[in-house]
Amino acid sequence: MKVAITGATGFVGSRLVERLQSLGHAVVILTRNADKARQQFPLAVYKTVEVVGYDPTQSGDWQQSIAGCDGVVNLAGTPIAEEKWTPAYKQQLVDSRVGTTEKLVEAIAQANPQPTVLVSASAIGFYGTSETAEFDETAAAGNDFLADVCQKWEAAASGVKERGTRLAILRFGIVLGLGGALGKMLTPFKMFAGGPIGSGKQWFSWIHLDDVVNLIIKALEDSSIQGVYNATAPAPVRMTELCTELGKQMKRPSWLPVPGFAIEALLGDGAIVVLEGQKVMPKQTLAAGFEYEYKTIDQALAQVLTMG
């Protein structure tokens, strides 16, 4: 296949590029910073990778690079929980997802020949937060800011269906690997100061990095995959359970809680991502026959920490 990817230089995207090349596929990277991407994916190593610079909120010549691609993977989006949610940052969270997706859908519509599939990221923030409810792909949307962003994001992606392009929307849980959220959580544990964040009762719906990459590839290759799929492992855990297992595997204490106000001081409204959660089950993902390499949190953490 030939696959165009937005967000290819990020945590998930970079692993996806590596896997696609290892499988013999050609990759077109759409990126704001072409020089950085070329350094990250040097041609001497990534022989089937082409880098195309673009402004994801503007129509332009970059859209021509979609023509001839078999599939498109849309992973673009400003990180949710890295800065305080000022009004300007909240708008950036929306524009980097909704605006980018709208321009990508426009490019797919103009392409000749057109890609046959768009795999577009969303997030389990779609469901809102709860300590008691369980959500699968059929559950209704929540009513907070993140739920609203996800609904608009998914609606933008759905435009490809009018042109007959197959659409798979993957609602990502918290992706476990050496980067991302887990990477930030490891620091206090290494300093013997680890413990649950906030109440510890909140749900933590996760997926291993390798599994989310394999799910994206399945969605590209399997023509029966269309609609919404939760990109989460089948065994979500509460924050206390996660931290207990993390302490056990790192041979560090896990009893020192990180108070909610400390996270709120750092992230403002963005703290909702770690202080509140949702129990999300991948009902449709399992029904589609996807096989997880890492079904339980102990398996996933053991692999990640071994790599570290």
Image: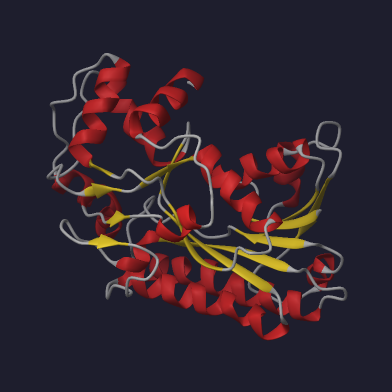
Tell me if residue 287 comes above or below residue 177 in the rendering: below
Residue in the image at 64% along x and 46% along y: 9
Tell me if residue 305 comes above or below residue 26 in the rendering: above
Residue in the image at 20% along x and 23% along y: 193
x, y percent for residue 168:
58, 66
Residue 246 visible in rendering: yes
In this view, the residue in front, 150 or 245, is: 245
x, y percent for residue 295:
41, 37
The furthest residue to the bottom: 162
x, y percent for residue 293:
50, 35
In this view, the residue in front, 87 or 161, is: 161
The furthest residue to the top: 251
Which quadrant of the structure image shows residue 221? bottom right
x, y percent for residue 22:
76, 35
Which quadrant of the structure image shows residue 213? top right
Which quadrant of the structure image shows residue 214? top right
Residue in the image at 74% along x and 38% along y: 39
Tell me if residue 57 comes above or below residue 76 in the rendering: below
